[in-house]
């Protein structure tokens, strides 16, 4: 136990150093971590790491999905809802079907049910990998929004396919109307449970005398309760976490104070950073165990099957990407779409090449039981595991390393960062002047009485600079806190009113207000 603890401690240090290296050489850290784990696994004397699928599904998956749901822009998610839904559900189903047919006809010993089982495993692209890569290149807001939105939902659809295929393998039959009913319940039940538990947690935050530490702990507990509750009633735990996370993120200004919001953001950034690093390192470390269980199939043949399935995934995603754009161009003549602009051929190229696979695929493969209900060995389990690993490795390394130069080569339309800065400055000016008007109309008679308020108004009129010469009157602090609360309400209402206003800009302004309030609370009055 002592040696294993030292080994895992060394792994954490290695993860931190590798992520620092990835930032230095501008390579997505999941790629380096998987390769490093692969290299470490072949060092003599290194303990054999066996990944428990429950460890990933229960411990890792809920918080990672929850963090993504809190950070995504709900406005962008809704704006691109049609194409996100098509990628997260239709494309995943199409991918699973293509993989299933390919495996059935070209891999000896694979039944159609086993093919669909493999298809459900490898169909969802990994959210973390695409997000890590996009940090090093500039892409249009629409591209990153669609990829982020897709990654929130595709895990649910792929795991639903996986579960239905597993039932077909274990029972030898597939009843379509029962599957349709189960699918309906998994989707609606998962979303409903997530929203219900999210509402309960919001009321707990509101009505109990919590502080920043308790609020942070509650946010850490919430995704696990959502996931486990949904899975207990055989609905989608993934959709429960996503819907609950989106709901709480949308209403966080109503039930979390500034200190809780700032503390929660810091804790979740570190927590997510550690979880992602451990998961990708463990993927590489698990290879020796997977190879040892390959059985009679030669490693060369198994690699060939992995390359075949990877090729199918890439081709299907390209077809789906261009197909989705073609459908959008046709349907915009009949319905209102998010954008009337022609995306051209470059945007679908990026979508098509952004299909890196990751932790969910490996966890699903590992969750396949070793034996059937009658005691016989589960057919092709070891080969499915190995093919899944090859798919993850090839897509992460090949697509992950080539995607940034491809984006630069395509020379996409200029990023809107300049426009964002201009919009940010405009919103800040409008917020400042409106707050000054509010204060003068309500508290103009006391402005001269409290030099601090007068000074702050002058600072707002200039640049809203650091607070200085804070006076010792509690009334002054109370009024200023009210002004900050007014600014929050103003920003939230403005965000709802202006459909084209970027959520990220509003979030930056809200965080600035939180920081201002915290600085005020720690200042002596």
Image (spheres, rainbow, N blue to C red):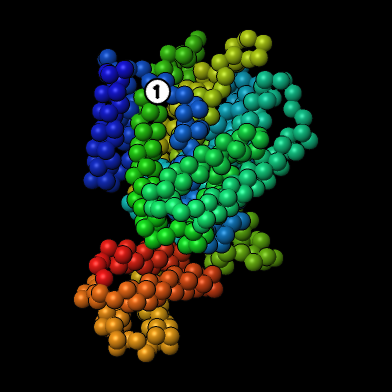
115 horizontally vs 69: left or right:
right
Which x, y percent locates residue 524? 24, 67
Q: Which residue sits at x=46%, y=47%?
A: 219
Residue 74 visible in the snapshot:
yes
Quarter in which the N terminus is drawn: top left
Asked where in the image residue 116 lies, by quadrant, the reply is top right
For image coordinates 57% across by 67% down, the residue present is 340
- Residue drawn at 35 percent across, 31 percent down: 281
Indicate the quadrant containing the C terminus: top left, top right, bottom left or bottom right: bottom left
Farthest residue, direction left: 469
Give the residue number, with chain letter if any, for mark 1: 286
Labels in figure, total: 1
For disc 1, the neighbor class at 10 Å (few under 14, some 14 to 19, many from 20) is: many
Q: What secondary structure is marked by label 1?
A: loop
Locate residue 322, reporting x and y percent. Answer: 56, 51
Question: In the rendering, at what x and y percent does residue 193 appear?
Answer: 63, 45
Tell which of 212 and 21 is nearer to you: 212
Q: Is residue 428 visible?
A: no
The one of 385 and 407 positioned closer to us in this rendering: 385
Q: Is residue 389 above or below residue 301?
A: below
Residue for point 57% across, 19% down: 369
> In the image shown, does 290 or 250 lie closer to the viewer?
250
x and y, in percent, of residue 422 in the image? 36, 74
Left or right: residue 500 compared with residue 374 = left
In the picture, residue 414 is in which quadrant? bottom left
> In the visual, does 511 lie left or right of 245?
left
Q: Is residue 257 left or right of residue 343?
A: left
- Residue 505 vertical placement versus 69 (above, below): below
């Amino acid at each position: 136990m002592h040696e294993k603890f030292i080994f895992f401690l060394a792994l954490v240090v290695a993860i931190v150093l590798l992520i620092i290296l990835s930032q230095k050489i501008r390579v997505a850290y999941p790629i380096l971590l998987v390769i490093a784990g692969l290299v470490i696994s072949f060092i003599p004397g290194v303990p054999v790491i066996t990944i428990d699928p429950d460890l990933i599904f229960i411990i890792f998956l809920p918080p990672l999905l929850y963090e993504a749901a809190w950070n995504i822009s709900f406005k962008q998610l809704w704006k691109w809802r049609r194409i996100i839904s098509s990628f997260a559900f239709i494309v995943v189903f199409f991918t699973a079907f293509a993989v299933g047919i390919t495996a059935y006809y070209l891999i000896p010993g694979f039944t159609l049910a086993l093919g669909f089982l493999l298809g459900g495993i490898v169909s969802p692209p990994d959210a973390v990998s695409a997000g890590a890569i996009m940090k090093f290149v500039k892409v249009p807001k629409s591209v990153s929004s669609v990829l982020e939105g897709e990654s929130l939902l595709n895990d649910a659809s792929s795991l639903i396919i996986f579960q239905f295929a597993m039932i077909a393998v274990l029972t030898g039959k597939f009843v379509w109307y029962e599957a349709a009913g189960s699918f309906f319940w998994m989707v609606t039940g998962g979303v409903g449970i997530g929203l219900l538990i999210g509402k309960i947690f919001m009321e707990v935050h509101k009505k109990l005398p919590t502080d920043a530490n308790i609020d942070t702990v509650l946010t850490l507990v919430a995704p696990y309760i959502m996931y486990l509750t949904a899975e207990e009633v055989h609905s989608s735990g993934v959709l429960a976490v996503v819907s609950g996370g989106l709901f709480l993120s949308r209403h966080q200004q109503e039930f979390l104070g500034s200190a809780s919001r700032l503390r929660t953001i810091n804790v979740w950034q570190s927590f997510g950073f550690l979880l992602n690093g451990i998961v990708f390192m463990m993927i590489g470390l698990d290879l020796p165990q997977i190879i040892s269980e390959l059985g009679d199939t030669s490693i060369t043949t198994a690699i060939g099957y992995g390359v075949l399935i990877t090729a199918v995934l890439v081709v299907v995603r390209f077809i789906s990407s261009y197909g989705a754009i073609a459908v959008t161009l046709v349907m915009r003549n009949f319905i209102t779409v998010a954008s009337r602009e022609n995306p051209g051929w470059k945007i679908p190229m990026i979508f098509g090449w952004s299909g890196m696979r990751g932790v969910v695929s490996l966890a699903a493969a590992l969750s396949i039981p070793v034996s059937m209900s009658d005691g016989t060995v589960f057919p092709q389990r070891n080969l499915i595991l190995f093919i899944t690993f090859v798919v993850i490795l090839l897509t992460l390394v090949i697509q992950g390393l080539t995607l940034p130069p491809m984006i630069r080569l395509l020379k996409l339309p200029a990023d809107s960062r300049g426009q964002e800065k201009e919009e940010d400055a405009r919103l800040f000016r409008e917020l400042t002047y409106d707050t000054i008007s509010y204060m003068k109309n309500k508290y103009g008679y006391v402005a001269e009485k409290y030099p601090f308020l007068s000074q702050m108004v002058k600072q707002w009129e200039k640049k809203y600079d650091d607070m200085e010469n804070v006076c010792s009157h509690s009334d002054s602090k109370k009024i200023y806190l009210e002004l900050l609360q007014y600014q929050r309400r103003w920003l939230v209402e403005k965000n709802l009113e202006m459909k084209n206003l970027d959520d990220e800009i509003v979030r930056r302004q809200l965080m600035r207000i939180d920081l201002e309030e915290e600085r005020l609370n720690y200042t002596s009055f």
